[in-house]
Amino acid sequence: MIAVLKPNTTEKQLESLTAWLKAQNLDVHISKGHFQTVIGLIGDVAKVDADLLESLEMVESVKRISEPFKSANRKFHPDDTVVDLGSTSVGGSAFAIMAGPCSIESEEQLTDIAEKVKASGATVLRGGAFKPRTSPYDFQGLKNEGIELLLKAKKATGLPVVTEIMSPSHLDMFNDVDILQVGARNMQNFELLKELGKTKKPILLKRGLSATIKEFLMSAEYIMAGGNTNVILCERGIRSYDTYTRNVLDLSAVPVLYELTHLPVIVDPSHATGVARLVRPMALAAAACGAHGLMIEVHNDPINALCDGAQSLTPEQFDRVVKDVKKVIEVTR
Amino acid sequence: MIAVLKPNTTEKQLESLTAWLKAQNLDVHISKGHFQTVIGLIGDVAKVDADLLESLEMVESVKRISEPFKSANRKFHPDDTVVDLGSTSVGGSAFAIMAGPCSIESEEQLTDIAEKVKASGATVLRGGAFKPRTSPYDFQGLKNEGIELLLKAKKATGLPVVTEIMSPSHLDMFNDVDILQVGARNMQNFELLKELGKTKKPILLKRGLSATIKEFLMSAEYIMAGGNTNVILCERGIRSYDTYTRNVLDLSAVPVLYELTHLPVIVDPSHATGVARLVRPMALAAAACGAHGLMIEVHNDPINALCDGAQSLTPEQFDRVVKDVKKVIEVTR
Amino acid sequence: MIAVLKPNTTEKQLESLTAWLKAQNLDVHISKGHFQTVIGLIGDVAKVDADLLESLEMVESVKRISEPFKSANRKFHPDDTVVDLGSTSVGGSAFAIMAGPCSIESEEQLTDIAEKVKASGATVLRGGAFKPRTSPYDFQGLKNEGIELLLKAKKATGLPVVTEIMSPSHLDMFNDVDILQVGARNMQNFELLKELGKTKKPILLKRGLSATIKEFLMSAEYIMAGGNTNVILCERGIRSYDTYTRNVLDLSAVPVLYELTHLPVIVDPSHATGVARLVRPMALAAAACGAHGLMIEVHNDPINALCDGAQSLTPEQFDRVVKDVKKVIEVTR
Amino acid sequence: MIAVLKPNTTEKQLESLTAWLKAQNLDVHISKGHFQTVIGLIGDVAKVDADLLESLEMVESVKRISEPFKSANRKFHPDDTVVDLGSTSVGGSAFAIMAGPCSIESEEQLTDIAEKVKASGATVLRGGAFKPRTSPYDFQGLKNEGIELLLKAKKATGLPVVTEIMSPSHLDMFNDVDILQVGARNMQNFELLKELGKTKKPILLKRGLSATIKEFLMSAEYIMAGGNTNVILCERGIRSYDTYTRNVLDLSAVPVLYELTHLPVIVDPSHATGVARLVRPMALAAAACGAHGLMIEVHNDPINALCDGAQSLTPEQFDRVVKDVKKVIEVTR
């Protein structure tokens, strides 16, 4: 960590600052330039409050020279993390395709979709049982009944399943779920992250609506700090000022995350755009820029879906998207 | 709700759409213009999925003509909500001043600050026991021990207290806390909101980092839908692209919320700016544009604070700010 | 255009509003619902000030039901615009590759790069002569001397050339330039757009740093309203809150624009990301989601470039990117 | 300027980097820590391309330790700039109130408004002659005829006048205009800024829609670098994701700019919010947080204004706002 002092800092101020920093068990290296003095801090700087330091009258600016995420950092773990799901995996050279309905509505609906997406090449079945809806008056999901239906579909098709968990108190219901999803709105629900860190379950962590890449990785770090390294990141669009799409899909986050972390990164073009017609182009783009997989909403009857029908593909559309995605992967990797 | 159809919509498409809408128990009024056909929907339109409707090929755009928040809406509840705290209240003509340290560190620290802010005019004591930190390696608060210290300070000073709750499973510890704060990162932690809706406790709901005003009110609605109408809103800065301040304090949200809702709206200039020097000007501005109160961080020793010292005022600075705020209120209301 | 009135609007207010609207030569259709009254306006609504209408006390909200861009609108011009450049073209089924240095530095530099990018498949040579720099103290380009060097390189290689124009007063210097680029910072420099509308020159219009898609198309409309329909749109990243990349490349704008307009849309991954390592993945993604072309910075000696070396590819890197882009196009179109 | 090297940098790489930097006439100070090596650069670092340096494989990050704006920097010019307008001034302890119609429509309209706002305490008359409109089909202003009407109103009332200039080629028409306004869309129209820098005219520079504070100051620097130090900054709202107000008024920019620069900073609540009802609260807030003045739209007949009537106050409303603003100034300064 480096602190740059203001030009008019006195010797006395410098001494007092140095003393204060040393009291925090830091090594302090002072480098005086023609115009400015720079202080280098060595030691357990993760514990230093950079904002506080920067707020001191004599300090011009502060810069951390190492990222605050350790477990997720590719620097210390150069090899790709591969999350094992038994019959399939996420990360490394595998390309994961998670597909299914936004909301689980009935056994027939889910099993029908599950068989179709499996036939088209999906590797994981998704389906919402607990639904985080902006309005308390909207359909909130079938909850534990939905999870039971999801497990039936898992049994019927052999596909591992992913579904969202919204509270640590629900953990018991998720014993047989293969991947626990943390939604964008809960990306910084730290109590939930901590509890998930105590399990060994694969976690699919969605990026918050306006989370920076660093905050996104720090939330992964919350899970990993508890001992659970099975974290899959999911870019799903960030908040912006335009209204033609629901969010702006930040695809450059994919190669940026690839450099910063060893965790797999998948992309959800359905939630990002909110528009079924845009799923195909953005799925192809995600595959082209190096994503480790996709999460796509598929519904057998989008117009009568209880939730987010606007962004769901039909199984036939999904089939064509998967075919094209595979071609893109073939020519770009 | 109004749906505008595309110019080339056929009669057959229109009939099919009308049939589908009527099947949802909606009255359908068709108005054909020279160039476009507009469909008006009447009935329980809150249940209509506007995104789905808009995604239909024949539909150009959809517009809700009533806000989806009912309980929080000033239209149906024209009088200001006043949240009663016994010795004081929040909302209406009262001006609330919530002050105290970001984190509770010790009994001496807290009681010392509590007495000082009370002497300066604070009406509520704030203090963090559970701290949502971006990094799992940062100080996470004294937790239940912190709450005990807060209750001691309450007893010593008579000030009602506000502190953040991060999980429904902690509710038991908060029995004697006067106001339960929901932090910005949990604004859409719907499981938490639902549980708080079942209590009668006053809730201080902070605006999410990139929450729209509508989403903010819908989160209040989650609490109110459970029967708890004691909700206080808090504007605390929204995410932006500039780096000179931590967030952008969206002060025009104050008069906008005043029009839309009967709930009290307070402002937190400390978290919004992250810089102690900016607290005074932004506190005065908040008072000038009609806020029902302020939440300000005060620390007796900011430079050694365990959390957010950079944005804390000393008790002396706080005293001067309160004096000036009161003058502004006097001349503007 | 539709205006929704507030529930408590009186008959007298309604009459007065109707009279005012009719005085503006509009047909007024009133539709009274159970709870709300909706007014439909027909006629030359492009001239109605929607903001003003919405500000009236009795008006709840206003919605335009037709886009304000006419010339750029695909609805009225379903076929793709193809901009003819003699030896090549932009739009339709062609895939344009514009490449070259950020700044023109010398004849050798430019001709060397031009020959190399041509050999790799570039269809247009780019090179900056007038440079819009954030700081007045940064290198501002070789100006007219730069344009002369660009025209020499055009002659030597036969490639059409594109370069940025910053002021209408410079137009004379651009007689032999094939495509005139309007930079992001000048997207709403309407005086410049109007002057370019009077020429027949192909214009490459870059999206403003925080321009909505509608504003982007309205700026194209400024050029087209003058009679010049040779407009190429360029997505080059929008402002966001993250700092890992310079901007967020909004790739979903590509398929959205494809629906809204008949104009060609190309993508500039170099300026969007600001990082050479990210150019390849984002160029592939742009090709995958349907862009009509790419604009890529190439420099023979990035480390000593006078401008934006950080985002420039070497000719060798560029060659590999073009090869991969072509494969993606082959499998996705 | 400081560059932090990656941990695995070799001695040879370090030497090569050092040689390259010294070749640019920079002093290089190397400081090796336990984990990382930091290079301090001294000399004319304003010319160093920080992005390029950061893009080098061995470089982890780069930080400028001094702001790139020199002329606008309060560090080097601690005293407030006061822009002299003859009968009045902007900056320092004066509080400027610029008021008038968005667009100049006729002599009667303008003179009537001018006399009324003067009577209420306005110190400068504003009125748009050249109007930057998003749509080419919207009213573009009376242009030179508008300026003539403005000068008549100046003569009649004695108020100095401010109006927007959109192109350097129009400069001749602005000889008798007291303050030349650069609109938000032209904040980075560098050719315009350079031409204005050659005049001695007071310039009112509006902040761009998504300009950072640094970019805003760099645009002021463009004008000042030409020798014209009469620059007034104007905060007028920045782009955000919410739709209740047109933009988000970034009031904390006011005290931040006060620290960074000696130039006066005024606030335009009319354009920021786009809603007349919000002008009063935001004008009071601007006064409370230290602005040097306000720019407010006033129209004698808002409902029939040719432009932006939605945000215009009537003269009576303006009168009350001024009275309240003055009270706020009295108690806060």
Image: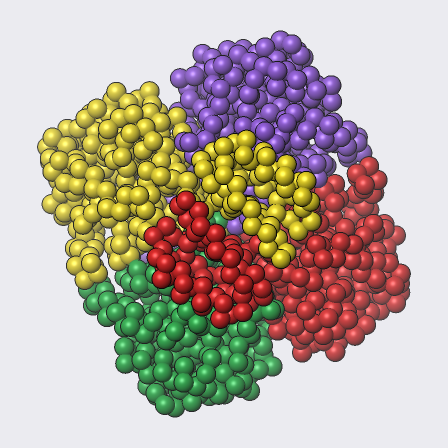
Chain colours: A yellow, B purple, C green, D red
Query: How many numbered dots are placed on residues in this image?
Result: 0
The one nearer the camera, A158 or D194, is D194
In the picture, measured across the screen, residue D317 lies left or right of residue A316, that is right
Q: Quadrant of residue C116?
A: bottom left
Residue placed at 84% from the left, 40% from the top?
D330
Tell me, yes or no, if residue B91 can be seen here.
Answer: no
Q: Quadrant of the C terminus of chain B?
A: top right
The one nearer the camera, A250 or A119, is A250
Tell me, yes or no, if residue D288 can be seen here.
Answer: yes
Please provide percent x and percent y for residue C306.
48, 73
In the picture, measured across the screen, residue A137 lies left or right of residue B277, that is left
Residue placed at 56% from the left, 61% from the top?
D42
Please provide percent x and percent y for residue A150.
19, 30
Residue placed at 20% from the left, 34% from the top?
A161
In the picture, measured across the screen, residue A119 lies left or right of residue A77, that is left
Please provide percent x and percent y for residue A151.
17, 28
Q: Residue furthest top?
A: B155
Q: Is residue B121 above or below residue D126?
A: above
Please provide percent x and percent y for residue A287.
25, 54
In the picture, measured across the screen, residue B98 lies left or right of residue C121, that is right
Q: Is residue D207 above or below residue A293?
A: below
Q: Is residue D258 above or below residue D198?
A: above
Residue placed at 44% from the left, 72% from the top?
C305
The one nearer the camera, D301 or D312, is D312
Q: Quadrant of residue C90?
A: bottom left
Q: Quadrant of the N terminus of chain B?
A: top left
